[in-house]
Image (cartoon, grey):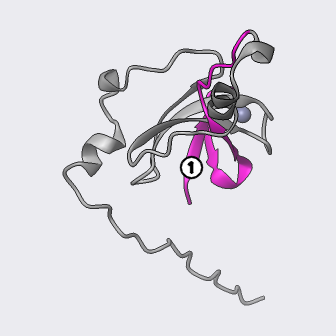
Amino acid sequence: MLLIRCPYCEEERPELEFRNAGEAHVVRSSDMASISDEDFEKFFFIRNNPKGVIFERWRHVHGCARFFNAARDTVTDKFIVTYKAGMPKPDLDKITDAPSAVAATEPPAKKKPARRAPAKKKDA
Ligand SMILES: [Zn+2]
């Protein structure tokens, strides 16, 4: 199961508690009424879809319900860093344990899901 760290709760929680909220750091014009149709289309509909690192908004819907930002590698699906909404994009070169750096040299490992041993029945 993918674990995502909520920067407000300050703990890693299962991905089922979170919802993606689209690309982060999309700047809204201060005067939307005066922008061209093309600029409005870019603001409203056009999003990056990189193969690699993307900055996204996420919401901890089944936790604190707050929005935060994350840098995620779209190839490995690994979260590089999460940070509070309103903070600037982090400098990913300063994050030493970035999974994208590992992915550049190693193919993604295929893991089997961990299975728990069935509980042993106790003789009464
Ligand atoms: Zn949270």
Q: Position of residue 66 (x, y in %)?
A: 76, 30
Name the residue at 26% across, 46% down.
102
Side (left or right) of 37 relative to 65: left
Q: Position of residue 62 (x, y in %)?
A: 80, 45
Name the residue at 58% across, 44% down.
4
* Foreground of the two, 115 or 93: 93
* Foreground of the two, 104 or 3: 104
Q: Residues within 10 Å of mark 1 (few under 14, many from 20)?
A: some
- The correct choice, above or below, for 57 with respect to 118 in the image is above
Q: Splitting the image into four quadrants, where does ligand 1 fall?
A: top right
- The correct choice, above or below, for 124 with respect to 64 in the image is below
Name the residue at 45% across, 50% down.
74
Q: Position of residue 91 (x, y in %)?
A: 38, 20
Q: Position of residue 115 (x, y in %)?
A: 53, 76
Q: Which residues are magenta?
A: 1-30
Side (left or right) of 111 relative to 14: left
Q: Decide whether residue 73 is among the magenta residues.
A: no
Q: Quadrant for the C terminus, please.
A: bottom right
Q: Decide whether residue 10 is among the magenta residues.
A: yes
Q: Secondary structure at mark 1?
A: strand
Side (left or right) of 79 relative to 38: left
- Report if residue 106 is visible in the image: yes
- The answer to which image quadrant residue 11 occupies is top right
Side (left or right) of 6 relative to 17: left
Q: Quadrant for the N terminus, please.
A: bottom right
Q: Furthest-top residue in view?
A: 30
Residue that mark 1 sits on: 3
Name the residue at 49% across, 46% down.
49
